[in-house]
């Protein structure tokens, strides 16, 4: 069964005692995708065809730079530029500064954020939103979401593990709620909320208290008291909001 591929890493993520198991999975995916692309995959013609076409977002360009392998990066960028420069030329030829002369062709596509009025700006926005690494990670990430709901429905021990976890970051809580719309029946959704809402409330409150105690520790009256769990309250507090690991050092090529 396909799900078993993802079951072990998903269980590991729940056992990692992290503020969010999906952040934990996401970090592994990010690192694996850098190892994959800048390992040897950039030399394969089908991968290069895809990276030439899709390009990379700002966040992943930064990660790719930090990773290392300058030659690998240069080779991918070179052929991406060749394609991009051709497309840009075509866009410029088609462009008319007269308002409405060249309607924004991307208006109806599902792009994030606000849509640009100007056709050239809209083309550039579409380029910025197109990323081979994001897409690569998203596809695998979606399999983990599927597996989460599969296990949640089939395995009572998994459900207990969710209940006993520290919950999720707000970002991934949102993703789980969104996915629950298609993965669960109305009855199942009700129970899901009964589990997740108190879990999120308790754990968001716990982080709030850790932050309070962290602040107290800077007051001379609390100077000699224990730090409790508040030493890393700032990076955890940041993660619990929108995901990710602010304290992580850049992930680098293992030479
Ligand atoms: Zn998260
Ligand atoms: Zn990206």
Image (spheres, grey):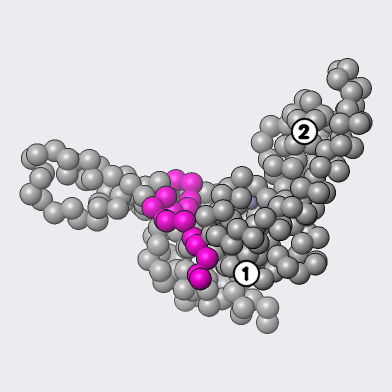
Q: Is residue 84 visible?
A: yes
Rendering coords of residue 184 (x, y %): 64, 61
SS for tag 1? helix
At a point 92% along the width and 31% down the height, the residue shown is 94
Quadrant in the picture for the N terminus: bottom right
Given residues 217 and 69, the one toward you in this image is 69
Instruction: Tell me the crowding category of disc 1: few under 14, some 14 to 19, or many 20 or more residues within 10 angstroms, Cα based.
Output: some
- Residue holding disc 1: 39
SS for tag 2? helix
Rendering coords of residue 168 (x, y %): 46, 56
Rendering coords of residue 222 (x, y %): 11, 44
Instruction: Tell me the crowding category of disc 2: few under 14, some 14 to 19, or many 20 or more residues within 10 angstroms, Cα based.
Output: some
Q: Is 195 placed above or below 217 here?
A: below
Q: Is 142 placed above or below 120 here?
A: below
Residue bounds of the magenta highlight: 240-255
* CA distance separating discs 2 and 1: 33 Å
- Disc on the earlier residue, 2 or 1: 1
Q: Is residue 196 visible?
A: no
Q: Are marks 2 and 1 in contact (CB under 8 Å)?
A: no
Given residues 130 and 212, the one toward you in this image is 130
- The quarter of the picture where residue 218 lies is top left
Q: Is 119 placed above or below 35 here?
A: above
- Residue holding disc 2: 122
At a point 81% along the width and 34% down the height, the residue shown is 107
Given residues 113 and 163, the one toward you in this image is 113
Q: Nearer the viewer, mark 2 or mark 1?
A: 1
At a point 45% along the width and 59% down the height, the residue shown is 20
Q: Residue furthest front?
A: 71
């Amino acid at each position: 069964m396909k799900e078993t591929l993802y079951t072990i890493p998903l269980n590991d993520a729940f056992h990692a005692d992290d503020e969010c198991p999906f952040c934990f999975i996401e970090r592994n995916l990010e690192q694996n995708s850098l190892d994959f692309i800048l390992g040897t995959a950039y030399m394969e013609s089908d991968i290069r065809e895809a990276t030439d076409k899709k390009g990379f977002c700002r966040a992943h360009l930064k990660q790719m730079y930090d990773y290392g392998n300058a030659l690998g990066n240069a080779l991918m960028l070179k052929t991406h530029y060749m394609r991009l420069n051709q497309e840009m030329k075509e866009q410029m030829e088609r462009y008319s500064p007269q308002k409405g002369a060249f309607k924004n062709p991307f208006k109806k596509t599902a792009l994030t954020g606000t849509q640009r009025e100007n056709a050239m700006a809209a083309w550039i926005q579409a380029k910025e939103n197109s990323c081979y690494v994001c897409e690569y990670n998203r596809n695998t990430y979606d399999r983990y979401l599927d597996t989460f709901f599969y296990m949640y429905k089939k395995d009572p021990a998994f459900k207990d593990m969710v209940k006993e976890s520290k919950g999720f970051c707000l970002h991934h809580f949102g993703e789980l709620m969104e996915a629950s719309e298609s993965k669960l029946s109305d009855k199942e959704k009700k129970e899901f909320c009964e589990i997740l809402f108190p879990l999120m409330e308790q754990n968001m409150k716990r982080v709030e208290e850790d932050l309070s105690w962290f602040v107290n520790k800077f007051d001379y009256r609390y100077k000699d008291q224990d730090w409790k769990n508040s030493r890393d309250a700032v990076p955890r507090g940041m993660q619990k909001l929108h995901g990710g690991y602010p304290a992580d050092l850049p992930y680098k090529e293992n030479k």
